[in-house]
Amino acid sequence: MTSPDNPAPARSRKPPHLLLQAHQTQQVPLSSPPHRSLRARNIPAITALFAASVLVLSACADEGGAGGADAASAKNISVAKIKVSSKDGATGAGITGTSVTVSGGKLTEVKLTEAASGKKVSGAISSDGASWKPGVRLERGTKYHLTANAEDAKGRSATENTTFTTVSSANSFIGSYTPDDGKTVGVGMPVSFNFDKAISNKKDVQSHIKVTSSSGQQVVGHWFGTQRLDFRPEDYWKAGSKITMKIDLDGVKGGQGITGVQSKTVSFTIGRSQVSTVDMNTQTMTVKRDGKTYKSIPISGGSPDHPTYNGQMVISEKFEQTLMDGATVGFTSKEETYKIPDVPHAMRLSSSGTFVHGNYWGSPSVFGNSGTSHGCIGLRDQQGGGGDTPGKWFFNESLVGDVVVVKNSHDKTVKPDNGLNGWNLSWSDWKAGSAV
C-alpha cells in the first residue's frame, strides 16, 4: 500500500545505488521527526550523490578520450630496442667489452665521449646496423657518456643514453700480449702475456685465455713468475696455420682487489718455416726454409771473453737501424764499453741484449773465421744499410718469430724467459708450468 508520505519507488528512474542510499537514509530512530520532514532533508543528499555520479561518468568519458590519444601515440613508438653493454651509472666497467646492439631496427648513430673533456672515442657500426664497437681501448678510471640512436623498419626513432665509469687502474690488471692481431710471424713465435700486476689467481686467469691452432696442435700455457704467461705447442707451429687467441678476462679476479678488463679475440698467421742454425765452431749460419737449406752465411759471433748464448732463440723485434750502447747491458769498463749509434739490420734474440745484426766496422776477414762481438751474431754489412750484403739479405728474409739456433758456443744455454725462448724447456717441463 502506498500513501503520499510513502510513495512507491520509481524503479525505472533511479539508479540502484540511489535507491539504496534513499532506503538507508530512511532507517532512522523512532524519535526522529515525521517522515515528511525526513524526506525533505534527504533531497539535497540524493541530489549531491547524483551529481557525483555524473562527475564520475564524465571522468570516465575523459579517460576514454585520453586512452584514444595514447593508442595513437603508441603507434608512433619505435620497436627498435637499444642495449648498451655498460649500464647507466655503472662503475668498474671494462675497457674493451663496451658495445651497443639493437633488435627490431638498425643503429643510425652512436656517439661515445669522455665526460670530462668531451673527447670523442672512435667506433664503427657494423655493416648490418645491428651493433657498434669502439675502435680503441677505453681508458681506465674514466667517465664516459654514450648516446645511441636507431630506427625501426617504419623509420621511427629510438634513443638510449648511458653514462658509465671504467674500472680504476688500482683495481684492475691488463695483459700486454704479442703477437698483434693480423700479423704473420715465424714458426717459433709464442703467444706471450705480460701483466701489469702480479697474478695470484693463475688458474682462473689462464683458463680465460684460449689459444688454438688450425693445425690441431695442442697449445699449453706456462707461467714465468707471477706476471708473464706464454703459450706454445710441443713443436714449432705448422707453417701456414692460423692461431686464434680468445681473451675473456673482463671481470676475472686476478688476485686480491684486482679484476681483469680485457675481452678480445686475436688471430695471426704462421708464415713459411725458417730456422737458422749458427755453428760457433765454423762461424757459419745455415738458413733452412721449409726444411731445406736456403743459404749459408759467414758470421762473427761472440768473442772468447764474451761468448754467445747456446740454444733456440726467437726473433722478437726488427730494427733497420738502432743504437747499441754497451753500458746498457753491463759493459762499462774502458776496455769493454762501446756505443754505436747506427747498427744496421738488427734483430733481437734475447731481452738481455743478444742480437743478430749487420756489422760494418769489423774487418771483412773476421766473418766466417773468428768471434769478435760482445755476444751478438754479426753479419757483414755497410754503414747506412745499403748495398747487397749478407746483413741486409738476412734481415729482409726474416720474420719476427723465426728461430735462430746457436750451438757449440762456450757459453750456457739461454734461459727460457730471456726473450721469447721457451723452446729451451722440454715439453714435460713446459706443461709443469701450467696452472690449468
Image (cartoon, rainbow, N blue to C red):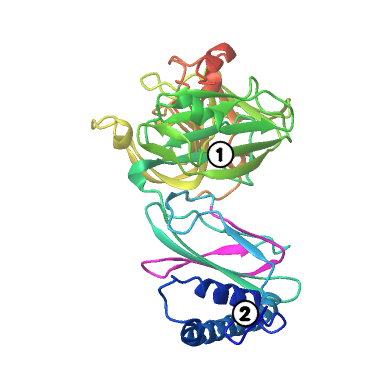
In front: mark 1 or mark 2? 2
In percent of the image, x 48 and y 40: which residue is there?
251
Q: Which residue is mark 2?
A: 60
Q: Is residue 219 visible?
A: yes
Q: Is residue 370 visible?
A: no
- Asked which quadrant contains residue 184, the reply is top right
Please rate how many residues cluster around mark 1, counting C-alpha atoms within 10 Å: few if below 14, some from 14 to 19, many from 20.
Answer: many
- Relative placement, left or right, of 41 versus 60 is left
Residue type at mark 1? Asp
Furthest-left residue in view? Answer: 334
Locate residue 255, reporting x and y percent. 39, 31
Locate residue 303, reporting x and y percent. 41, 23
Residue type at mark 2? Cys
- Relative placement, left or right, of 426 versus 117 is right
Write the start and end of the magenta stretch as one range.
Answer: 98-124
Q: Earlier in the sequence, mark 1 or mark 2?
A: 2
Q: Nearer the viewer, residue 184 or 92?
A: 92
Circle 1 — which element?
strand
Q: Which residue is mark 1?
A: 248
Q: Nearer the viewer, residue 228 or 310?
A: 228
Locate residue 416, reporting x and y percent. 48, 22
